[in-house]
Amino acid sequence: MLLSAAMIVKNEERFLAGCLDSIAGLVDEVVIVDTGSTDASVALATARGARVHRHVWQDDFAAARNAALDLARGDWILYIDADERARPCARDRLNRELADPGLCCALVRFHPRSGFTAYPEYRLFRRDPRIRFRGAIHETMLPDIERLIAAGDGRIGWSGLTIDHLGYDDDQSHKLPRNLRLLVKETRVNPNRIYLWWHLGTVYRDLGRLAEARTAWQTGIGIARRDDTSPPDGVLCYIEVIRLGLDHGEDMRGLIDEAAAAYPDDLFLVWLRGQALMAAGAFTLAVAAFETLAAIDADSLVTHSAYDRRVFGADALAEAGTWAFRLGRWRESEAFFRRAEWRAPDMLEWRVKRQLAGARAAALP
């Protein structure tokens, strides 16, 4: 048996059928660990041929994930959740990719929410007792995979698989109390894991506790500053503090410069730089930032981070046009909206804004 899908589920009847349908024919078995469903999830999974195991929830996502690994029988594991979908992928292609004896893990292209670009995600790995999930929340098996690679027991490759995550498209407020509880606990266990501080900050923000949100993100920035390797997650905390400052009218150019020096490839920092420069009246420099983003094709972009597609292409031009309008630069605004409209002719909003800017420009002496 080549491939087992290993899942944990609780009350996912709304999503589960779509997930299972998307991987039918792609995997050889589906193993589901149910952590206490009271809806039709178990019956739905069983009807589609999944092997379902009941697991008492222990406030520990890694424990539940590892229970699924223990039940799997395939040579490889596909780690997927009920609110995710695998895009069509030829099984023979996947077979060829996973037949490489030198691989211990294969990356997929992962879209974390609708309207976002893809980033590489570690979702396929060999069933190996040395690979286990760790962490009560934001559980990960990557440290174990990295240890195998360091010991010369494998390498990471690419697969042709693409996965879309749909869960964040819905209201997540019902998860805030649980996430807050687990994140507070986990930051005590793993205080140097920046991603936990970023997520803790977003939970505080969504609860309206902005001072505590900023403190959590500043903690993450402090960890990043002490780590000469510029851990990838560090940029998330920088971004949140910068966005919060910009929303409150603060000059964030200094922190943007610091973040860009540590994370020079991050494209959302380019967007924030454009925002900050526009707010400071540095129009020409700001336009250069938006022009950089306008030249990027979101459809083909696969980078270390996922980005909202609305910071690229025609949207970047429209954003420059909006700022130019605010600054009373009617001719420049009209020109930017015209270019955006040319790329996306169905966007009525941009057509109206182009016409309004043009009318203002025509009225100039």
Image: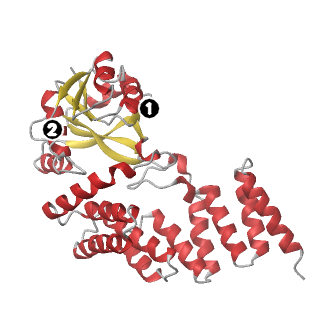
Residue 133 sits in which quadrant? Answer: top left
In which quadrant will I find the C terminus?
Answer: bottom right
What is the three-letter code of the residue carrying label 2? Asn
Residue 91 sits in which quadrant? Answer: top left
The residue closer to the viewer here, 43 or 166, is 43
In the rendering, at what x and y percent does residue 247 appear? Answer: 51, 74
* Residue 113 visible (yes or no): no
Residue displayed at 17% across by 46% down: 60
In which quadrant will I find the N terminus?
Answer: top left
Can you say whether 61 is above or below 31 in the image? below
Residue displayed at 34% across by 28% down: 94
Residue displayed at 12% across by 42% down: 153
Total numbered circles: 2
Label 1 residue SS: loop
Comparing labels 2 and 1, the label whose residue is closer to the camera:
2
Q: Is residue 332 left or right of residue 272?
A: right
Label 2 residue SS: helix
Q: Is residue 279 left or right of residue 269?
A: right
Mark 1 highlights which residue? Answer: 87
* Residue 357 visible (yes or no): yes
| Mark 2 to mark 1 CA distance (whole Å) | 25 Å
In primary-sequence order, the first of circles 2 and 1 is 2
What is the three-letter code of the residue carrying label 1? Arg
Please tell me the numbered disc located at residue 66: 2
